[in-house]
Image (cartoon, rainbow, N blue to C red):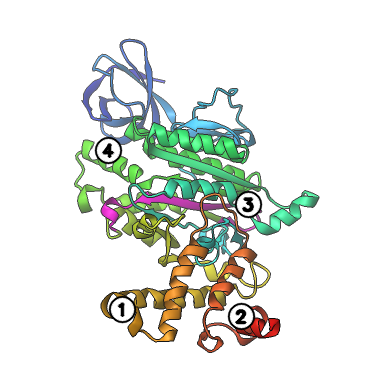
Amino acid sequence: MKEYQTITEISGPLVFAEVDEPIGYDEIVEIETPNGDTKRGQVLESSDGLVSIQVFEGTEGIDTESSVRFLGETMKMPVTEDLLGRVLDGSGNPIDGGPEIVPDRRDDIVGAAINPTAREYPEEFIQTGVSAIDGMNTLVRGQKLPIFSGSGLPHNELALQIARQATVPEEDEASDDDEGSEFAVVFGAMGITAEEANEFMADFERTGALERSVVFMNLADDPAVERTVTPRLALTTAEYLAFDKDYHVLVILTDMTNYCEALREIGAAREEVPGRRGYPGYMYTDLAQLYERAGRIEGRDGSVTQIPILTMPGDDDTHPIPDLTGYITEGQIYIDRDLNSQGVTPPINVLPSLSRLMDDGIGEGLTREDHGDVSDQLYAAYAEGEDKRDLVNIVGREALSERDNKYLDLADRFEEEFVDQGFDTNRDIDETLDIGWDLLSMLPKEILNRIDEELIEKYYEDEQAEEVAAD
């Protein structure tokens, strides 16, 4: 291992050093400062005689007298089942005061891409306990379904609720005889404030969710470069638990906006030609390298499901971060500012939300045979009610027909009873669908043109018929 004292330039999070041998891309570097501190970094660029190194802990204290050692290997994550229940910093070091981690092995954090021919199609339901997701935008195992939010909206509370409540229903039944895969959560936080970190940890510990979770914490005052490593460490851990230990792993990454800001910062320090809004032109590729690590592999019992969370700058979904994320992922869940100001929790707007894989993960044997029809009819009725709200603002409620008023009432009740459930209520899928039928039963049977007649006979609650019978 050669040691150099040839640092020529320090620029933001980057250090440039002269070398006299070929150095590998992504190679890990140790930099020893004159006062004896050792900082870790990674080779970003390697050309004849000059390498640029991004330093994880920031470049403070490094000068031209510092020595640079190239370790000859890429960054690796020590993986073991004992990581469950542990809290690590953004570089993968334990920060919970627990024992040292004794790894089964050390995996490369870039991960190997899943061979497309070995991918299994995602089609098994994950129950989050949140009606607006389970009922209308169902999450399936192996999917990547981002949450699009805005600053000041309660996306963290929703993330915690999902982390706490998410289960695989048929595994619950199988766990009685100890067969089937277990469920685990890998939580990667990037650039969050210390206050948010404390809230996350307090909730994980209070609810006991920490026992089945691995938590990575990169705080806002940690170096931006570390932010680019945190999701890769989290996903490497998730892949090990899923494909080696047969867990169904839910990976929650928050906040992808902070991750992309870190990419922009490093790109600016490298003096790269910027792309849209100053973000690097390769951001699409970079995000795809993270999101595409979700999935299922033929012959393996485990799965990796991703819920990345991003705050849209200025609530603008045409901004590069949500725009590129939407191209790569299979749908999105929208957190709505208007619903939030009305006190609806969680404030999920189901109309622009979408789960592209929902149809394959619902129905008889997976959720319930009426799920697809109820979802379609609720969607149509709520959209109709939203249109009528605009009309009421112009002509007043009295000018609307009785049928239009029913749609208006349904839209209000949909938000109050179906979407608004609080962050502590855990509804199973039957409860969610029963609430849906309760709402649809406000409408006359002949309007329900998206539901099979047999299902209407079975589930429709004919209040007038019940009243007659009671008399």
**Residue farthest to the right?**
177
User: Around disc 2, counting alpha carbons within 10 Å, would you say few (fewer than 14), some (14 to 19), or many (20 or more)?
Assistant: few
**Residue of label 3:** 302
Q: Of the residues shown, which amino acid type is indicated by label 3?
A: Gly
Structural crowding at the residue carrying mark 4, measured as other residues with C-alpha within 10 Å and reported as few (<14), some (14–19) or many (≥20) = many
Q: Can residue 75 be seen in this view?
A: no
10 Å neighbourhood of mark 3: few (<14), some, or many (≥20)? many
Q: Residue at x 37, y 73 (%)?
A: 386
**Label 3 close to label 2 by CB (< 8 Å):** no
Distance CA(mark 1)–CA(mark 3): 55 Å
Q: How far apart are marks 3 and 4 (CA)?
A: 35 Å
Query: In the rendered image, which residue does mark 2 sit on?
Result: 463
Q: What element carries label 3?
A: loop
What residue span does the magenta drawing correspond to?
Answer: 296-316
Disc 1 crowd, CA 10 A, few/some/many (<14, 14-19, 20+): few
Q: Which residue lies furthest to the front in this view?
A: 471
The mark found on residue 266 in the picture is 4
Name the foreground residue: 160 vs 70.
160
* Amino acid tagged 4: Ile
Residue 153: percent from left, percent from top: 37, 50
Q: Residue furthest top?
A: 35
In front: mark 2 or mark 4?
2
Residue at disc 2, secondary structure: helix
- Going from N to C along the chain, the mark reached first, 4 or 1, is 4
- The residue furthest bottom is 446
User: Where residue 65 sits in the image (x, y, percent)?
Assistant: 26, 14
The reply to whether the C-beta atoms of the residues labelled 2 and 1 are less than 8 Å apart is: no
Answer with mark 3 or mark 4, whichever residue precedes in sequence: 4
Q: Is mark 4 on a helix, strand or loop?
A: helix
